[in-house]
Amino acid sequence: MERRVAAVRAFNRFYTKQIGVLNERWMRSDFSLTELRVLYELAHGDGIPAKDLAEELGLDPGYLSRIIKQLNERGFIDKEVNENDQRLVTLRLTAEGRSAFEPLDRASGEEVRAMLERMTESEQKKLVAAMTTIRELMGDEEKAEPYLLRPHQVGDMGWVVHRQGALYAQEYGWDGRFEALAAEIVAEFVKNYDPKRERCWIAERKSEIVGSVFLVKKDDVTAKLRLLYVEDAARGLGIGKRLVDECIRFARQVGYKKITLWTQSNLVAARGIYEKAGFKLVGQQNHKSFGKELVAETWEMEVVRG
């Protein structure tokens, strides 16, 4: 047992040094790691009660209160006090807070990406699988998102087209013409990819691809959300919602004014995600495609900064 205790402590020392936990300021910024964790949660939520935030981060309420006070004084956080109960406070990130956080969030992602790129594909998968195992064994399985999102890489596009074709054939009886359409969309994305204005997110779970989505440029002010899908075995984990949220966040970040998408009325789960995210149904059209009589739908949302 003593050897195991020593091994765990050695890993803890190594990992805290690796990710810079001991640095007073994170990423050489004006924020501590705890402050950035607060900003991260607020950036990925639409108003969070202070009590829930304390529980999620495992922070003492008094300590969190002092952090919130400092961030509020700097103009990064808005506090909304419940008129019926002054003890209930909802926190939101301001436009200034989002502007301060997003460059650091991107830099953190790039730092991790650089670390991973020093490894082979096999080593990357082993590392991610080991980290997932640690979280599960430490009791984080329910709270943690048991998947990760990453940018696309060579080899992903063929898999996406294959799974799009196979899943829609299996679940809705669509014929090979839908797979052909998916292949055309993917080929156009790869050939004309603009990394400053476009993204593909790949969702992985236990080192296997379980979902994806594309956000592509339609014109200077409008982006198109395309080819959202989640594997059946990974549904119910919030992956579809997260993929759509990433599209919206990126669109806001790079300055798009609108996101549009084209879907079918029988894709009930996807339509529910779009509606909850803020998309509005703006048009319908009966058509025969993929061997079926379908009702095509166009959905749009205005992208509001901050």
Image: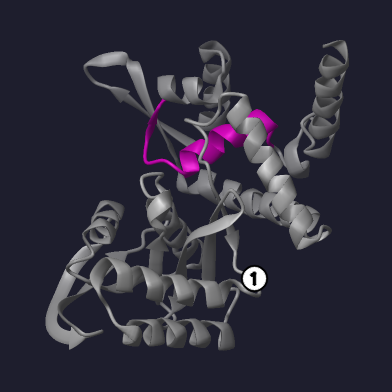
In the image, is residue 303 above or below residue 164? above
Q: Say which residue appears at 52% left-offset and 31% top-offset.
A: 141
Vertical side of 7 occupied by 286: above or below: below
Secondary element at tag 1: loop
Assess whether residue 210 is covered by the magenta stretch. Answer: no
* For residue 262, side relative to residue 46 (left or right): left
With 285 as the anchor, is 157 left or right in this view? right
Residue at point 34% right, 85% down? Answer: 176
Residue 144: image location, x then y, percent? 52, 35
> Is 171 positioned to the left or the right of 63 in the image?
left
Residue drawn 68% across and 47% down? 128
Residue receiving disc 1: 153
- Identify which residue is drawn at 77% across, 31% down: 21
What x and y, as percent, mark residue 205?
A: 55, 50
Q: How is the image coloured?
A: one colour
The residue under label 1 is which amino acid type?
A: Gln
Give coordinates of residue 39: x percent, y percent: 55, 37
Residue 235 horizontal side relative to residue 246, left or right: left
Q: Is residue 111 visible?
A: no
Residue 122 appears in view: yes
Magenta run includes residue 38 = yes
Which span of residues is magenta-colored? Answer: 31-49
Residue 144 vs 101, above or below: the answer is above
**Foreground pick, 81 / 297:** 297
Number of residues whose C-alpha sits closer than 10 Å to that of mark 1, classed few (under 14), some (14–19) or many (20 or more): few
Position above or below: 195 against 48 = below
Image coords of residue 91 (percent x, y)? 41, 31
